[in-house]
Amino acid sequence: MFTPTMRILVVEDFAPLSRAIVQGLREAGHAVDPAMDGEEGLACAQSCPYDVILLDVMLPKLDGLTLLQRLRKQRHPAAVLLLTARDTVADRVLGLDAGADDYLVKPFAFEEVLARVRAMARRRYGQRETQVLIDDLEVDLTARTVKRAGRAIPLSAREYAVLEYLCARRGHVVTRMEIWDHVYDFATEPSSNVVDVYIGYLRRKIDADHEHKLIQTRRGQGYVLGAPE
């Protein structure tokens, strides 16, 4: 099942569980940031346009439901999966009424976390296509493979993540900051030109041997994949 690369925040104060979730999500290809208490989680959420937030209910400094209510009042767009040991109907209703998109009771298997994240991604992005065709460029979003003029193009995980985001925004100018916010987590060493570097890698692999260049620069604005709409 196709799941787009997403920027995810994990707000969980039990360190072993937080590490396991963060590692698993990163291995699944997502950009993930951890937060260990409610105040840190709120600050992270307010500073970045996360796609999904995994949020423990019982947190130090600021509880999960209060954090969630504040985000919804601020119209934060992230889908929120509540993580809690409370399993009564009243607790579930309370969490959903506070603005959660889904609810997962501890203990849980990590495979179920991934399944819930995939479901929220599908709801967030709608029924997205599994293949993108731009001129003679073919991107299989399920297999995560790339071809140009029928020739397979090997990409690193980071190169693919950048290309996938450009595909999602194809025909539109995408700023460097938008690419950074979507693809990189806070653990990534910041660099003023890291996005430009990966765009350069993609150009060498996708455009270098072709007269028609698909990745274009809009000076002072950003990048566009394919002809702008």
Image: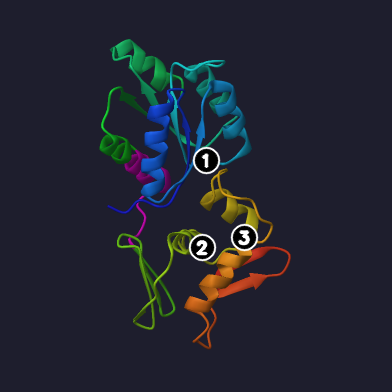
Task: Indicate which label's residue lies in the foreground, 1 or 3.
Answer: 3
Mark 1 to mark 3 CA distance (whole Å): 20 Å
Q: Report the residue marked by disc 3.
A: 194
Cβ–Cβ under 8 Å for marks 2 and 1 = no
Q: Residue at x 37, y 39 (%)?
A: 120
User: Dot 2: what SS?
Assistant: helix
Report how far apart the C-alphas of labels 3 and 2 lie in the structure. 16 Å
Q: Earlier in the sequence, mark 3 or mark 2?
A: 2
Judging depth in this view, the residue of 228 and 195 nearest the camera is 195
Q: Position of residue 85 (x, y in %)?
A: 33, 16
**At x 64% / y 53%, what residue is drawn?**
177
- Tell me, yes or no, if residue 100 can be seen here: no
Q: Are marks 1 and 3 in contact (CB under 8 Å)?
A: no
Horizontal and vertical percent for residue 74? 60, 29
Quarter where residue 227 is shown: bottom right
Residue at position x 41%, y 48% in the image? 125
Which quarter of the rendered picture does the C terminus lie within? Answer: bottom right
Front residue of this view, candidates 19 and 5? 19
Disc 1 target residue: 50
Residue 103 vs 136, above or below: the answer is above
- Residue 15 sits in quarter: top left
Q: Residue furthest right?
A: 220
* Amino acid bearing label 2: Leu
- The circle on residue 166 is 2
Magenta region: which residues?
Answer: 117-130
Neighbours of disc 1 within 10 Å: few (<14), some (14-19), many (20+):
many
Whether 119 is drawn above or below 189: the answer is above
Residue 96 to residue 30: above or below: above
